[in-house]
Image: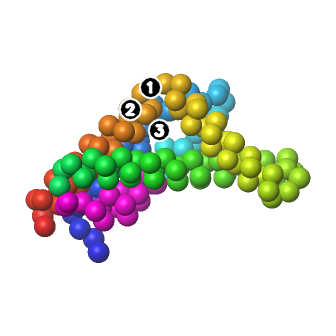
Amino acid sequence: MPTAARLFAAIGFAVMAFFATEVYKPLLPEGTQMDLFTPINVAIGALCGWLVMGRVAGRGYMPAMSHGLRTSVYTLFYVLFIWSGLEMYERSVSLHYEGPFEALQEMVKLSIEYIQLGLTDPQVPVALLLGGILAAFFAEWASRQWS
């Protein structure tokens, strides 16, 4: 059911995903195609905000912090899943793998590499954590205003 808290959570986590993506982009290797990188990550952030944080908003500001961090982790998981899956798919089309199990193993390795790359700059985890908390407070505020 659409609520103000869900809408504000979706907006907040979309903004968090936007800033985290923009901080992450310079870490990517030269020549990496980033046409849909930001829009897809923003959409994932908005969807996680709507479905995860929006559902639990209204329980207080202290629980909102943990819910916001949890929603950031969900967003990160799905972003990694999408982008490592796409990379794995592109490699499998060019017959890079011998079988599906090897392709799935490589997908996990790619996710770990993406996480390690993001940890080379402290701005990325800060954007995810602080952005998640602020977005959760935003959703909590909306829940208190319009419930």
Q: Foreground: 45 or 140?
A: 140
Q: Is residue 102 visible?
A: yes
Does residue 94 appear to the left or right of 47 in the view shown? Answer: right
Q: What mark, if any, has residue 122 been given in the picture?
A: 1
The residue positioned 64% from the left and 28% from the top of the image is 29
Mark positioned earlier in the residue sequence (3 or 1): 3
The residue positioned 57% from the left and 47% from the top of the image is 80
Q: Which residues are drawn in magenta?
A: 43-59
Question: Which residue is labeled 3 in the image?
Answer: 21
Which amino acid lies under the numbered mark 1 shown in the image of this protein? Answer: Pro
**Which of the 4 image quarters holds residue 1?**
bottom left
Residue 129 position in % (x across, y down) = 36, 39
Which amino acid lies under the numbered mark 3 shown in the image of this protein? Answer: Thr
- Disc 1: CA contacts within 10 A as few (<14), some (14-19) or many (>=20): few
**CB under 8 Å between discs 3 and 1:** no
Measure the alpha-carbon separation of dots 1 and 2: 6 Å
Residue 22 position in % (x across, y down) = 45, 34
Measure the alpha-carbon separation of dots 2 and 3: 12 Å
Q: Within the magenta stretch, is there residue 55?
A: yes
**CB under 8 Å between discs 1 and 2:** yes
